[in-house]
Every structure is written in structure tokens, then in C-alpha cells.
Amino acid sequence: MKLIHTLAQLQSTLSVYRHPAVVPTMGNLHAGHIALVHAAKPLGDVTVATIFVNRLQFGPKEDFATYPRTLEADCAQLDAAGCDIVFAPSEKELYPEAQSFLIQPPPELADILEGEFRPGFFTGVATIVMKLLSCTQARTAVFGKKDYQQLMVIRQMVKQFNMPIDIVGLDTLRAEDGLAMSSRNGYLSATERKEAVLLSHTLQTLADSIRGGRSNYAELEAEAMALLSLAGWKPDYVVARRRADLQVPQTGDALVVLAAAKLGTTRLIDNLEV
Ligand code: PAF
């Protein structure tokens, strides 16, 4: 496996390949990321993982400064997974000047749910993903469905800009108790880690109620929020939305339930397709 820090070296290394399959990450890798690499491997003639903690997608009060940078351990895991190239650029390499061209996803998608609570997040994500897909000459890129709204933003961006790239979404990997794998789980204390399962249980209960025939979504959402609050969480949202565009559903729509909530100081998100 080759570890590359510069665009020049990346370009020369990629010149002999026709179909890079790319897994963009911010590092601090866990089994969920490694599953993305395994999925990417058969989809291209070279597998590239990118590791870059993207300042543009963090709010001023968020964890950019403290986000764990664990390059050595990440590379060991990627090597073991059969990744061919790791592209881990510095900020200077990727943003040599202030990024003044930005990709602004449409407000109806980017200003709801995560975008409501993390203003500017999807502009930061879309902008860096556009840059990373371009730098790595991606023909396929693999993302986790845990970031459901992010995946939707990326799919629509690639479609509207006619980028010749297949976007593949992979099911969320979960711990045995159901907690969705996330780098931010590392922030949880031992007690919080045990309590954290409540988020996926809440979504499961909501999904089961909908499958069982209840369609009073607002009431179900309020019940789910109350359940989390009662257990000491600070929920941002628990909602049932239309899978196609994350808008409020009409009867017969295929649904996804999504949640974001803070446990202590750690903000977790999760979702389930119903
Ligand atoms: O999902 C992530 O880890 C990040 O948002 C991504 C897609 C790598 C962009 O920085």
C-alpha cells in the first residue's frame, strides 16, 4: 500500500489506472470504514482511501480541533483490508488558498435535518467531496448510509454535474447491541457507551410502529423524542421522512427514520430504512 501526501504524487501514481474506486474518509477508521474499502475493492482497478479532516464542514463550536488524527493506525487497517493507495493530504495541499468556489447544495435538501442543526455542513461536505473525487479521478466512490443525508447530497451533486462516477451506498455497520459504528463513538464514556444503544432502539421502535400500521408520524416522532429526553439525551430530531427526498411523507411513500441526539457532549446520528 502506498501512502501519498501530495497531489503531484497522487496524479503520477494514478496515471496507470483506468478506474479508481475511492473511499473518502476523515480517518480515525473503524470497522464501518473498512467495510467500505472491502466493498470498493472489486469495483475498480485500484482502491484509494482518502483521509482528510475537512475544516470546511465543521461549525465554529464543533470538534475540528479535537477530531482524532490517527494516521498510523488507519494505514495499518487499510493495508490489512487490501487498500492500494491512501491519499492523506495536508490542509495546505488541498486548500493552498482560501476555497472561494463552493458547492452549495439546494436548501430543500441541505437546510433540513443535519443542515438545520449544522449550518453550512453540506456545503463543506459537497465542496470537499467534489475536490476529492476530482483529485482521485474516481470512477466509483463508496459511502456509508449512516450519513444518509450526506449520501443523498453527494448522489444529487454527481448527477447534476454529470460526473461519470458511480456512487455506492453501503448499509450501516453496527456493534452487537445495535449502535451504529461511528468515529464519534470514541468520545463516549463507558457508561454512555452502554446507554448509546437507546438511539438505535428508538429508531427501531419507531420503524416497527410504522410497519405495524401507525401513520400519525408527528405523534410517533414526539413520542420518540420524549423517550430520548426522559433518558437524559438532548435530541435534535427524530423523524420519519420520504426516502426519495427526505421530505415529510405522504401515504404510500417508502420511508426512512432518522435521528440525531446528544448524549453528554457527544452528538450521534443514526437512521433506518423502514
Ligand atoms: O463522511 C465523512 O467522513 C466525511 O463527511 C467525508 C465524506 C469524508 C467528507 O469529508
Image (cartoon, grey):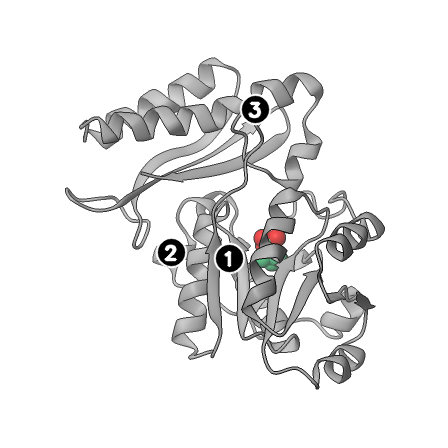
Sequence-first disc among 3 and 2 = 2
Above or below: residue 108 compared with residue 43: above
Task: Name which residue type carries label 3.
Answer: Ala
Sequence-first disc among 3 and 1 = 1
Kindly identify the residue that appears in the image at 58 percent across and 74 percent down: 138
Task: Name which residue type carries label 1.
Answer: Phe
Task: Name which residue type carries label 2.
Answer: Leu
Instruction: Tell whether 6 sits left or right of 149.
Output: right
Question: Tag 1: Cα neighbours inside 10 Å, few (<14), some, or many (≥20)?
Answer: many
Kindly identify the residue that appears in the image at 30 percent across and 27 percent down: 208
Q: Which mark is residue 122?
A: 1
The residue labelled by disc 2 is: 109
- The residue nearer to you, when weighing 230 against 144, is 144
The residue labelled by disc 3 is: 196
Mark 3 C-beta to ligand 1 under 8 Å: no
Question: Residue 121: percent from the left, percent from the top?
Answer: 54, 54
Question: Tag 2: Cα neighbours inside 10 Å, few (<14), some, or many (≥20)?
Answer: some
Above or below: residue 198 compared with residue 79: above
Kindly identify the residue that appears in the image at 77 percent across and 64 percent down: 88
Front tag of 3 and 1: 3
